[in-house]
Image: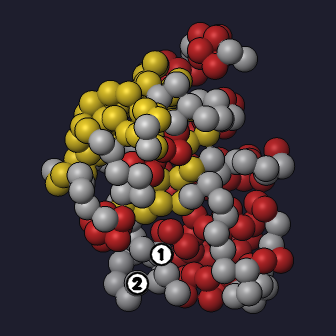
Amino acid sequence: MLRCTELNTWYGPAHVLFDVELDVAEGRVLSLLGRNGVGKSTLLKSIIGLVPPGSGEIVFDGMSLRGLPPHRIAQAGIGYVPEERRVFADLTVEENLEIAELRRGAWSRREAFRAFPALEEFRQRRAGLLSGGQQQMLTIARALMGNPRLLLVDEPTEGLSPIMVKTLAGTIHDLKRAGQTMVVAAQDLRFALSIADELAVLDRGRVVYRKDGDAARADVEHIKALLAL
């Protein structure tokens, strides 16, 4: 579904991504693991068009994304959940979902509340009053309102309690069972392994490790060494 080939991205004079090779098959969850500052967010932003790559190729479902603005990439079927939980704080949970809801497609507010039952309980609460974990669920649910075929999720566990991290992992498994393809960037090794059909480790802008989920789960000590844990 998605293939990145020899991808290089710069922030001004700073070379951030180096010849990144990555692919994601339909219906799979790729965990993109790495320490803070190694280029995970930049890679997701390059895919969605917020930080255009300087060279290389990004192909989604047979279509090149190079040079397309973010709104065109979103229209092509890619959703994006940024690291910052950008909810509309003064709107209710339901209103946050309503403004993103398309008239056609599999996802509706009803489906969102079914997939995220904790949100239904607070559907009339202002989003700014939700906990960090609840806001994270809301941002993911809101992205799904656009019916993306591929969902990019950046650091969803940042600042969450262990209970909320476990809840989030369960939600991702539910979405995967429903056929949702995802790339999830994370620093939390346990979380990344728990959701991964495939796992890639990024270090200093390069993919230094790539295995399917089962092989990665049997290779924890090697991965820890790569992360310097």
Crowding around mark 1 (Cα neighbors within 10 Å: few <14, some 14 to 19, many 20+) is many
Residue at coordinates 79% horizontally, 50% vertically from top-left?
159
Classify residue 86 by image quadrant: bottom right
Q: Which mark is residue 173?
A: none
Location of residue 87 in the rendering, given as x and y in whole percent from the top left corner: 66, 74
Q: In this view, does 22 lie above or below 131?
A: above
Q: What residue type is labelled 2?
A: Leu
Crowding around mark 2 (Cα neighbors within 10 Å: few <14, some 14 to 19, many 20+) is some
Q: Is residue 47 above or below residue 223?
A: below
According to the image, label 1 marks what residue? 145
Q: Is residue 110 visible?
A: no
Q: What element carries label 1?
A: loop
Location of residue 226 in the rendering, given as x and y in whole percent from the top left corner: 59, 15
Colouring chosen for the image of the structure: secondary structure
Classify residue 85 by image quadrant: bottom right
Q: Is residue 3 left or right of residue 150?
A: left
Q: Is residue 149 above or below residue 51?
A: below
Residue at coordinates 24% horizontally, 37% vertically from top-left?
56
Residue at coordinates 43% horizontally, 63% vertically from top-left?
79
Q: Are marks 2 and 1 in contact (CB under 8 Å)?
A: yes
Q: Which of disc 1 and disc 2 is earlier in sequence?
A: 2
Q: Which of 227 and 70 is in front in this view?
A: 70
Q: In this view, does 184 lie above or below 136?
A: above
According to the image, label 2 marks what residue? 102
Q: Is mark 2 on a helix, strand or loop?
A: loop
Location of residue 184 in the rendering, given as x and y in whole percent from the top left corner: 53, 45
Location of residue 32 in the rendering, given as x and y in whole percent from the top left corner: 51, 36
Q: Can residue 105 be seen in this view?
A: yes
Residue at coordinates 23% horizontally, 41% vertically from top-left?
57
Q: What residue type is labelled 1?
A: Met
